[in-house]
Structures are given as C-alpha cells and as structure tokens.
C-alpha cells in the first residue's frame, strides 16, 4: 500500500466527529453562561474558604458533655427507629407495586398505572414530602416515617419491576405448564429468581433511609436531624460536630451491615 493510500485509509478509519465537538463546545459555553447568571465567582469561593476555616475552628473540639450525649442518644435512636419502620413498611408496599409494574407479567394498563404511581413517589425529594406530611400530621417521627415510606416505594418498586422484567421467562413458562395458578407462578416461578436482588435493594434502602432520616428531621420529621438543627440554631457548633461524627459512624456501620446482608442472601 502506498503512503498516499495509507494516509487516506487512516483518515477514513478515524473520521472527525464534528457533531460531538460542537455539542461539547455548546455545553462548555452553557456552563460559563450558567456560572455567570448564578454569580459563581472565584472571589466568593476564596471568601467562603475563610468563613469555613472560622466555622470549623468553632466546631473543634467536639462536645462530649453528659447532657449533650443524652440528647444525641435520644435523637439517634429515634432516627434508627424511623429508618427501620419506614424501610419495613416501604418494602412491604413495594413488593406488590413492583409486581404490578412489571410489563412482562401484567396487562399494559395495569403496569402503566403502577409505573405512574412509582413515578409520583419518585417525583419529589424526601425533604419536600416530609414538609407536606409535617403540615398534615404535625411535627414528629410520624411525618418522617411517612416521607421515607414514599421514598422507599419510589426506589424499591422501580428496581424490583426492572428485575422482574430482566428475569428468564423459561422458569415461568415451566410453572405455567403445570397448571399452576397466577399466585403459584409468582411464588414458584418469579420470586425465586428475583428475591435475592430484592433483599439487596431492601438492604440498600435501609442504608439510604438512615441518611435521609437526618434530612427529614431538619424540617420537623423527628430524629437526629431535629437535634442537629436545634444545635445549629443555638450556635452549639462543638455539639454539631459531635452529632456529625455520630451520623458518620452510624452510616459506616449500616454500610458494613448492608454489605453483609447482600453477601448472605445473594
């Protein structure tokens, strides 16, 4: 092959994608435009670093007074209870909702109705839902539990429905061939294939609800979030650091426990 032919073949093998280049250029220009409209400047960032240094200086050392630790213990226990109850109820409700949303098992109108319900649950952040429930049922753990139930349904139901749609239908057809009822098909043909993944989803949701219970508490949903918000309002920044350290510890323990559960049931 001559050098000219080799050069021509290379040019054809690696053509310039001008559409992609133009797309990245437009994205870069839009980022610059968005930063200018949102007043994101280097001066503000540098000033923020100085404020952050002062703030962290007021947080150290953490406060481990007995009275503070009692408040921390009460709030943390309530957050754990909120997360466990919300996960338990959310998982129970997500199981049938996910089955109804599976398009390979249900009629189209049923699956789309269920998917609409799931989309509604996923449309709002748990904090927004918690604010609504606080207005409905008042301040306290109940509002936080209801908000996290909605969040759990939106997450687990969607993943469960997708897991059912990705399963092999050969086992389902084999169970149907025996003359089994619809419930028999679910118990013997569907659940054995997806139950391990469903347990993994539930373990992850418990871990997520532990984190979200802090956020919903800030808006009145009970738990450690309420204690954290009160400490901020009182300028007890050393106690704020203690609360944050406790939250990090609980999340790390939850992560280890959820990973262990996934290994056990998968």
Image (tube, rainbow, N blue to C red):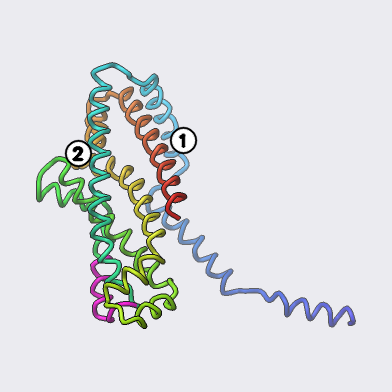
Q: Which mark is residue 222?
A: 2
Q: Which mark is residue 46?
A: 1
- C-alpha separation, residue under disc 2 versus residue under disc 1: 36 Å
> Crowdedness of circle 1 by 10 Å Cα count: few (<14), some, many (20+)?
few
Residue projecting furthest to the front? 178
The structure residue drawn at horizontal position 27% and vertical position 33%, both measured from the top left corner, is: 76
- The range drawn in magenta is 105-118
- In primary-sequence order, the first of circles 2 and 1 is 1
Label 2 SS: loop
Query: Comparing marks 2 and 1, which lies closer to the viewer?
Result: 2
Q: Closer to the camera, 95 or 57?
A: 95
Q: Closer to the camera, 96 or 138?
A: 96
Q: Please state the total of marks drawn on the protein image.
A: 2
Q: Which mark is residue 265?
A: none
Pick the quarter of the image with the C terminus: bottom left
Classify residue 91 by image quadrant: bottom left
Residue 116 counted in the magenta span: yes
Residue 163, given in percent of the width and then of the height, sits at 40, 67
Q: Name above or below for residue 264 compared with residue 118.
A: above
> Crowdedness of circle 2 by 10 Å Cα count: few (<14), some, many (20+)?
many
The structure residue drawn at horizontal position 29% and vertical position 71%, both measured from the top left corner, is: 101
Per the picture, the main secondary structure of the magenta-coloured stretch is helix
Q: Is residue 119 visible?
A: no
Pick the quarter of the image with the N terminus: bottom right
Q: Name above or below for residue 132 compared with residue 5.
A: above
The structure residue drawn at horizontal position 29% and vertical position 69%, both measured from the top left corner, is: 99
């Amino acid at each position: 092959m001559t050098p000219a032919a080799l050069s021509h073949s290379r040019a054809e093998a690696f053509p310039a994608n001008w559409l992609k280049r133009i797309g990245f250029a437009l994205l870069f220009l839009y980022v610059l435009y968005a930063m200018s409209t949102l007043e994101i400047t280097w001066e503000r960032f540098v000033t923020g670093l100085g404020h952050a240094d002062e703030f962290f200086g007021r947080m150290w050392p953490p406060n481990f007074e007995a009275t503070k630790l009692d408040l921390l213990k009460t709030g943390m226990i309530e957050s754990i209870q909120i997360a466990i109850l919300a996960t338990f109820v959310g998982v129970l409700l997500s199981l049938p909702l996910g089955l109804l949303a599976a398009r390979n098992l249900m009629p189209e109108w049923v699956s789309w109705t269920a998917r609409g319900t799931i989309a509604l649950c996923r449309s709002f952040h748990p904090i927004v839902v918690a604010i609504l429930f606080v207005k409905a049922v008042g301040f306290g753990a109940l509002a936080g539990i209801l908000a996290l139930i909605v969040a759990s349904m939106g997450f687990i139901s969607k993943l469960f429905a997708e897991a059912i749609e990705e399963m092999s239908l050969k086992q389902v057809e084999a169970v149907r061939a025996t003359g089994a009822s619809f419930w028999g098909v679910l118990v013997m043909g569907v659940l054995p294939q997806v139950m391990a993944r469903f347990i993994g989803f539930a373990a992850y949701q418990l871990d997520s609800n532990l984190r979200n219970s802090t956020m919903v508490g800030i808006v009145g949903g009970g738990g450690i979030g309420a204690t954290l918000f009160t400490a901020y309002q009182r300028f007890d920044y050393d106690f704020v650091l203690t609360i944050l350290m406790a939250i990090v510890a609980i999340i790390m323990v939850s992560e280890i426990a959820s990973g262990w559960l996934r290994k056990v049931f998968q």
